[in-house]
Amino acid sequence: MITYVLLHGAWHGGWVWRRVVPDLRAAGHQVLAPTLTGLSDRAHLINPSVGLDTHVRDVVALLDAAELSDVVLVGHSYAGQVITAVADQRPRSVRARVYLDAFVGNDGEAAIDLLPATVADHYREAVAGPGFGWLIPVRQLPALGVTEAADLAWLGPRLTPHPWLSYTQPLALRGDHRDVPARFIECTEWARVFRGQAERARAAGWPVTAVPTGHEAMVTAPSALATALLDAGRQ
């Protein structure tokens, strides 16, 4: 039995995987979808010191406490940074890394460095203004490719500001993550902010799968995404 650990991106919580989890469990796998510190149902823990290191500790502690092995570690969007660092610290526990429209960072790179310049500038302006200098305000969901009224009604009230420090802290890697096979799933029916990250993955020789949906594939194309994740578990 494989254990899938599904990590959400900015503004979200573990609940966002709700439409994907049943297919993975029906295939006989264990699924964990934790919420990172400071977000969603853990928003009461947010403060200016919550950053990438905090979120990496969240997941490493989960792997250790539950004595998990043979893990398929899935990171959506921002959480690409998290799964890279976790795989670097616990390579023997992780079977595969899956980057779902996510950052593919190298040692010394922060998430903000990996965004297209216009998007990065927008983030900085939002943080400096309504983010009070330490929060990334929630983005408008249509910009992420979510357009269905039911999806907007489900997602919108549950999203919370994201800690800016997690985007500015650089990865500090030993290099052990390279021992863990990786693949990229690109969401192709939106602004494709992560196209450059998909190109990095191809250049590294990773398998790259396209899912024709917006950035929130776990919401807008859960069956197609579950199929891609099950394929990743077989590699």
Image: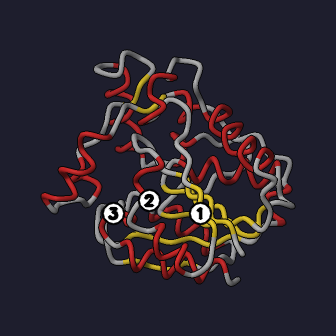
**Real-space Cα separation, disc 3 to disc 1, in angstroms:** 17 Å
| Disc 2 and disc 1 in contact, CB within 8 angstroms | yes
Specify the label residue 31 is tagged with. 1
Quarter of the figure that contains the C terminus: bottom right
Residue type beneath disc 1: Val
**Real-space Cα separation, disc 2 to disc 1, in angstroms:** 10 Å
Q: Secondary structure at mark 3?
A: helix
**Real-space Cα separation, disc 2 to disc 3, in angstroms:** 7 Å
Q: Measuring from the top left, give residue 216's x and y in whole percent.
A: 35, 60
Nearest to N terminus: mark 2 or mark 3 = 2
Viewed as shown, does residue 172 lie left or right of 198? right
Q: Residues within 10 Å of mark 1 (few under 14, many from 20)?
A: some
Viewed as shown, does residue 55 lie left or right of 153? right
Q: Is residue 83 above or below residue 225?
A: above
Residue type beneath disc 3: Val
Q: Is residue 151 above or below residue 10?
A: below
Please tell me in which quadrant of the rendered image residue 126 appears.
top left
Quarter of the figure that contains the N terminus: bottom right
Residue at (53%, 74%) from the top-left corner? Answer: 24
Specify the label residue 17 is tagged with. 2
Residue type beneath disc 2: Trp
Which residue is denoted by mark 3 in the rendering? 219
Q: Nearer the viewer, residue 45 or 30?
A: 30
Identify the coloring: secondary structure
